[in-house]
Amino acid sequence: MENPHVLIVDDREIARDGLKALIREYVPECVITEVSDYDTMMAVLRQGRYTHLIIDPGIAGGKLRERFPQVRKEFPELYILGHTLPPGAGDVGWLLSKGADGYVSAEAGSGEVIAVLCRRRERSREGAENPFLSLSPREQQMARHMLNGDTSKEIQNAMRLKSSTVSTMKGRIFRKLKVSNLVGLLKLAEYCHFR
């Protein structure tokens, strides 16, 4: 899975700094760019391959409301998250109706902001970017058993499999997810919020 490339758009430096610090603390491999206005945002989006856009719908200049549909049309795979919206604010419904993937209110906890960094928009031909979605339903079931700390014998009994089948499936899960052991699986599951 490629590292998230996040563009933060807010005309308040303190808000950008806060989001950057929060993201870097929990997702240190994340590549972060920040800008303060709509025009710069569009220029930066066109220059790089971003996975996420975190934007304050109230950025100065008032261009976002009239131009936001262009952002969604031009960057259909970009995961867009509005922020600093109080719950129930009028811009929430508008932003979501124009193609944003979600929002985080100013009162949200750090976990809510970090959770979005694992989410990606589904690609039309390549499937979803979350690697756990590449597993079959049966492999996902086994991965959950593994993440719960179940032993091979417990998995064998719970899923009614032969010992050799459990071993084969574990190897296939590790290969598909590009991890080499349970520790890697645990870290990936935590990063992708796979339960």
Image (tube, helix red, strand yellow):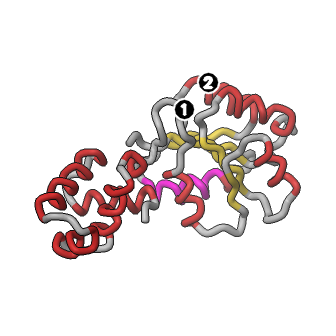
The residue at the point 27 percent across, 73 percent down is: 158
Whether the magenta-drawn stretch holds residue 22 is answered as yes
Q: Which mark is residue 124?
A: 1
Q: Is residue 146 above or below residue 120?
A: below
Q: Secondary structure at mark 2?
A: helix
- In-front residue for pair 15/119: 119
Q: Residue furthest left?
A: 164
Toward which corner of the image does residue 83 lie, by quadrant?
bottom right
Query: Relative to 19, is 95 above or below?
Result: above
Q: Residue 131 location in percent, x, y?
A: 39, 47
Residue 52 to residue 182: above or below: above
Q: Split into 4 quadrants, where in the image is the N terminus? A: top left
Name which residue lies at 48% across and 42% down.
128
Category of crowding for the residue at label 2, using alpha-carbon neighbours closer than 10 angstroms: few (below 14), some (14–19), many (at least 20): few
Name the amino acid type tagged 1.
Ser
- Residue 129 percent across, percent down from the top left: 46, 42
The amino acid pointed to by label 2 is Arg
Q: Which residue is mark 2?
A: 46
Secondary structure beneath label 1: loop
Asked if one can make out residue 40 in the rendered structure from this viewpoint, the answer is no
Q: Which residues are magenta?
A: 16-27
